[in-house]
Amino acid sequence: MDLFNSRILLPTSEIPKEWINILPDLPTPMTPLVNPADGKPAPPELAMRIFAKECVLQEVSQENSIPIPNDLRAMYASIGRPTPLHRAYRLEKELGIEGDNIKIFYKNESVSPTGSHKLNTALAQAYFCKKQGINEMVTETGAGQWGSALALACNLSGIKCTVYMVRISFLQKPGRKILMKIFNAKVHASPSEFTESGRRYWEKDNNHNGSLGLAISEAIEHCLRDESIRYSLGSVVNHVLLHQTVIGQEAKSQLSKIGEYPDIVIGCAGGGSNFAGTAIPFIREKIRGVYPETEMIAVEPRACPSMCKGKYMWDYGDTAKMAPIVKMYTLGHNFIPSPIHAGGLRYHGMAPILSILLKNKVIKTVMHHQTDVIQAGLLFAKTEYILPAPETCHAIKEAIDQALKAKENKEKKTILFNFSGHGFFDLLAYKEYMDGALKDYEMPTEEIEKALSAEDMPKINEAFF
Ligand SMILES: *Cc1c(COP(=O)(O)O)cnc(C)c1O
């Protein structure tokens, strides 16, 4: 155990100079975003009314890489990039795998000022909006991590920020709401009374739990009110996954400095951005045959298993059917998830890029129960002394399982997982676990079948494309 070298750091000059675009390497072509109004691929003008122009161009770019503006690299430097890569020596010892046969590394995105990887894309999106002369950004947030990242990024770039926050989290996680307000964002509990999509639910039940899909509808409606407003997504779409590739590129050069390359790359998956951002540099080398054996594992909660139990089909991005229709693994847009603590993993769909990679068996997925996941997080906290977010605990649980499997099979494995965020705003999840009050939820297969055969699933004719 070499604790002096357990943290591998890079100088700010080694912040990546470009993002890696995986679109040209996908085994089957990227599917378009479809306009819910007519079932045809959304014209760029419509996408540009909703998103920053630069992000729309990145969304469909076929370039292998896209340069990161130097001013934005400076912003990354100012908020803690490059982030450290750690070797989990004490966790390894606890698992009885001391030595150098099985190694566990984690990329620590929790050192960002809002505590997760989400600032990587928030800074980029706010930067491009500012450059374009936009003066307000609007978004939705589940657990509040995305909202607080965008609030900080907008504040840094001098743009107004409005956030629709899923009500269950608004109530369960007041800390995140306060953080957003510290950065001058306006925060509304969703469903709210401020939009038509929200009022439909709010009027029936003003204590409705809400869902990410519903909050997206409210944010898009808000965006369409004024030409100077742009909407922003924290996950799922191609440009967000692109921005997150700084994680994997840094991790790859950190590992190469000590002569390592991962056999297994693991990340938790809500919309898929932190997993994809970590894995894409390795996925590209796998697809190109440089390192064809690398295993990529996306981890989901059993309560919201979009890839593990959903189907690959066209679906709306949101409950009110205002967001673009995308082809993805989905549990159906009407899915209202159980209130598990990993709020960031409670989205009904999955990034189209990851959906294509899963369909073509380039990546794998697994799912775990909430209690097993929090138990793994506690073990991590007690050995590595960083408290993981409940979302991150999913990746930790799988990394531990993979390490123990390798131990049993007497295999050599280098495991890399992304430590997507810290859990200082999620202490209640740990309290519930320690009090023995934490429950497991599993989505019954019949319910998924029913949701996916619902009358209002979009019917898209790909022959028209
Ligand atoms: C938002 C979030 C996630 C899930 O989002 P992805 O887009 O799938 O990465 C995971 N971990 C943390 C800490 C988050 O904040």
Image (spheres, grey):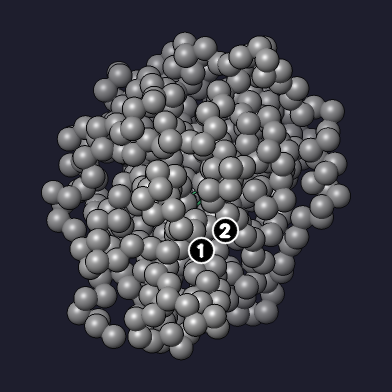
Residue at the spot of label 2: 299
Q: Secondary structure at mark 2?
A: strand
Q: Position of residue 130 (x, y in %)?
A: 29, 25
Q: Position of residue 100 (x, y in %)?
A: 34, 81
Q: Residue at x 82, y 52 (%)?
A: 445
- Which of the two labelled residues, at mark 1 and mark 2, occupies the earlier sequence position? 2
Q: Position of residue 383 (x, y in %)?
A: 41, 82
Q: Residue at x 31, y 46 (%)?
A: 246
Can residue 333 be seen? yes
Could you tell whether 88 is left or right of 235 in the image? left
Q: Position of residue 34 (x, y in %)?
A: 60, 20
Q: Nearer the viewer, residue 109 or 402?
A: 402
Q: Residue at x 43, y 85 (%)?
A: 97
Residue found at the very far front of the displayed protein: 289
Can residue 37 be seen? no
Q: Nearer the viewer, residue 321 or 189?
A: 321
- Amino acid tagged 1: Ala
Residue at the spot of label 1: 395
**As drawn, 119 above or below 370:** above
Tell me where residue 258 sits by quadrant: bottom left
